[in-house]
Image (tube, rainbow, N blue to C red):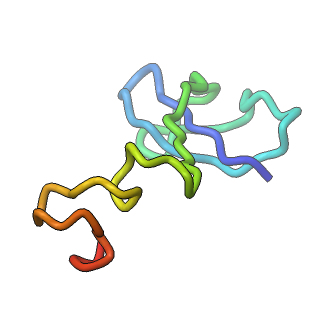
Amino acid sequence: MPLYEYECEKCGRRFEVRQSMGDDGATLECPSCGVRDPRRVFSSFFCAGSDDSSLVGGGSSCSTCSSGNCASCGI
């Protein structure tokens, strides 16, 4: 099941809910204030491929060392 992020329009709290793709969240309640029908918001998601050399660990040095191989510093 996908994980969706919602925001309460009354108190502004963001929370995540695991639900089926067809569910619109109309029956959900804010875990902080109990208001029903929160607004679904876009979540950030990122998945890097192993061949992306522009990312940490992909062949360029990281911010914690000057090595070209970030495996040497554990990142």
Q: Hey, which quadrant is residue 5 in on the image?
A: top right
Q: Quadrant of the C terminus?
A: bottom left
> Toward the viewer: 28 or 56?
56
Percent position (x, y) of residue 34? 51, 38
Percent position (x, y) of residue 41? 55, 25
> Toward the viewer: 38 or 4?
4
Q: What's the residue at 28%, 68% (across, down)?
A: 70
> Toward the viewer: 68 or 29?
68
Number of marks? 0
38 relative to 14 in the view: left or right: right
Percent position (x, y) of residue 23? 83, 34
34 relative to 64 in the view: left or right: right
| Residue farthest right in this picture | 22
> Toward the viewer: 31 or 51?
51
53 relative to 5 in the view: left or right: left
Percent position (x, y) of residue 17? 63, 47
66 relative to 24 in the view: left or right: left
Q: What's the residue at 41%, 22% (across, down)?
A: 10
Q: What's the residue at 64%, 25% (across, down)?
A: 37
Q: Is residue 51 above or below residue 12?
A: below
Q: Is residue 35 above or below residue 49?
A: above
Q: What's the residue at 54%, 40% (across, down)?
A: 45
